[in-house]
Amino acid sequence: MGWRAVRFGLDRPRLMAMQLQALLRGAGARPLSVMFPFVAEPSEFHAARAMLLHERDRLAALGHAVPERLEIGVMLETPSLAFAPEAFFRAVDFVSVGGNDLHQFFFAADRGNERVRRRYDTLDAAYLGFLRGIVARCAAAGAPLSFCGEAAGRPLEAVALAVLGFRTFSTRPSAVGPVKRLLRAIDLGEAAGVVEAAMARGAPVRAGLEAWVRRAGLLPH
């Protein structure tokens, strides 16, 4: 929460312009992808995007090489952005769900506060249903989607995210091996049945999914 990320940049346009110039100059003529973080409403994205395009055009007019392909996306970390108009999802080149911030804002549980940060489960049925809605909106708009955060680095959570439709994950390097091993070993259709059944009953998704994975011998007892 608070004054940071894209909010800070839009309120300090000269500083943000310098950062955007550095990205563009560093890329040169090579392809460049720029993701704006902590966007809470479409107007913030459109303003940041306009600044980036202005800096690109200015550099080109000065004779500098500019990216041959420029993709401009957004990190979805605030629940408000999940309910943005369809036109917004069609305007972005890609969406990355920022799971760490999104989780804490969804449950109003500060992840820096030990009294509440472990109280709410990433595999909560309501939260998974919310993520499924984001997947559906991006799919309908044709916006490439990924998931970034600690949950993507935990094998059980990664299975649930894959069930919802996420196919691209960003996480710490040490988690890649365990996550890939489990995702390659499971039948995603069967996993979907387990997750969907638990959500429909209002039963704990984590308990049901973990029991299914253990029965298959894919997690140690």
Image: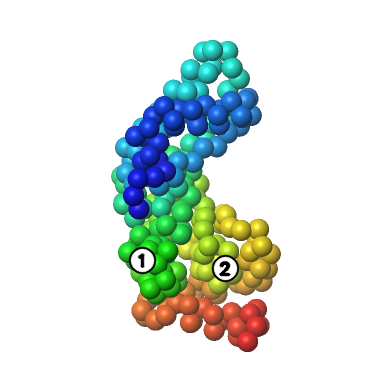
Q: Nearer the viewer, mark 1 or mark 2?
A: 1
Would residue 164 be visible to someone looking at this image?
yes
Residue located 57% across and 55% down the image: 170
Helix, strand or loop status at disc 2 = loop
| Callout 1 amino acid | Ala
Residue 91, by quadrant, is: top left
Would residue 68 be visible to someone looking at this image?
no
Q: Dot 2 surroundings within 10 Å: few (below 14), some, or many (20 or more)? A: some
Residue 173, by quadrant, is: bottom right
Residue 192 image point, x, y percent:
50, 71
As rendered, which of 16 and 138 lies closer to the eye? 16
Indicate which disc, 1 or 2, sits on the residue closer to the N terminus: 1
Disc ID at residue 109 = 1
Residue 39 image point, x, y percent:
38, 45
Residue located 39% across and 45% down the image: 4
Q: From what the image shows, is residue 97 above or below residue 221?
A: above
Residue 218 image point, x, y percent:
65, 78
Question: CA separation, marks 1 and 2?
Answer: 20 Å
Q: From what the image shows, is residue 121 above or below residue 165?
A: below
Residue located 37% across and 71% down the image: 116
| Callout 2 amino acid | Arg
Q: Are marks 1 and 2 in contact (CB under 8 Å)?
A: no
Residue 196 image point, x, y percent:
44, 73
As rendered, which of 204 and 111 lies closer to the eye? 111
Disc ID at residue 215 = none
As rendered, which of 11 and 131 lies closer to the eye? 11
Quadrant showing the C terminus: bottom right
Residue 125, by quadrant, is: bottom left
Helix, strand or loop status at disc 1 = loop
Q: Which residue is mark 2?
A: 154
